Image: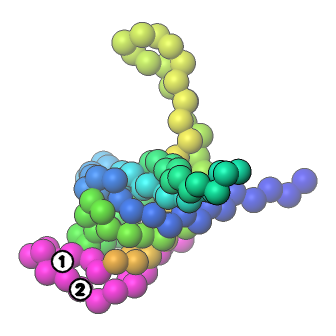
Amino acid sequence: MSSLNKVMLMGNLTRDPELKAVNGKSSVLEMGLAINRTIKSDNGESREEVTFVDVTVWGRTAENVAKYLEKGSSALVEGRLQFDSWQDKATGQNRSKLRVVADSVQFLSSPKDAGGEQQAQNQNFQQAA
């Protein structure tokens, strides 16, 4: 049986991206993404539903995201779901989390540069295969 694990999400960063080096060679970045959805109830009132997703970005893409995006920036993320499970050291309870591992990140708002100035819109950075 065939399977497919593909995710596309568009939203705003909930916090500044956190870039780290792994083994001094590869870069990994963690960021949060908020995806808003407006829902109309049966009586016609609309309310907003927000989904918060943790996203991991690797390599050169991670470095570019850290350089150009910040809290509140809009981005389109393409990637795959990854299920993480571990045992909490403090309580001994089993924990689990779904996250998105990004293959590409497209900047939808004007990204910042190292000096805080705005750059061109819609830059797209993809993970090297």
**Image point (69%, 57%), residue name:** 5
**Image point (80%, 56%), residue name:** 3
**Residue 111, horizontal then vertical, whole percent:** 27, 77
Whether tag 2 and tag 1 are in contact, CB under 8 A, the answer is yes
**Residue 118, horizontal then vertical, whole percent:** 20, 83
Q: Residue furthest right?
A: 1
Q: Is residue 106 above or below residue 18?
A: below
Rendered image: mark on residue 119: 2
Name which quarter of the figure residue 84 lies in: top right
Count of numbered badges drawn on the protein: 2
Q: Residue furthest left?
A: 115
Q: Is residue 43 above or below residue 63?
A: above
Label 2 neighbourhood size at 10 Å, few (<14), some (14-19), many (20+)?
few
Q: Residue furthest front?
A: 43
Is 82 left or right of 20, judged from the image as shown?
right
Label 1 neighbourhood size at 10 Å, few (<14), some (14-19), many (20+)?
some
**Residue 31, horizontal then vertical, whole percent:** 36, 53
Quick one: SS at disc 2?
Answer: loop
Amino acid under disc 2: Gln
In reply to whether residue 16 is colored magenta, the answer given is: no
Q: Earlier in the sequence, mark 2 or mark 1?
A: 1
Q: Magenta segment, principal secondary structure? A: loop
Q: Which residues are magenta?
A: 110-129
The colour mode here is rainbow
Amino acid under disc 1: Asp
Q: Is 99 in front, or is 12?
A: 12
**Residue 95, horizontal then vertical, whole percent:** 52, 24
What is the distance, in whole Å, between disc 2 and disc 1 at their CAs?
7 Å
Is 16 left or right of 14, judged from the image as shown?
left
Name the residue beneath numbered marker 1. Answer: 113
**Image point (34%, 53%), residue name:** 14
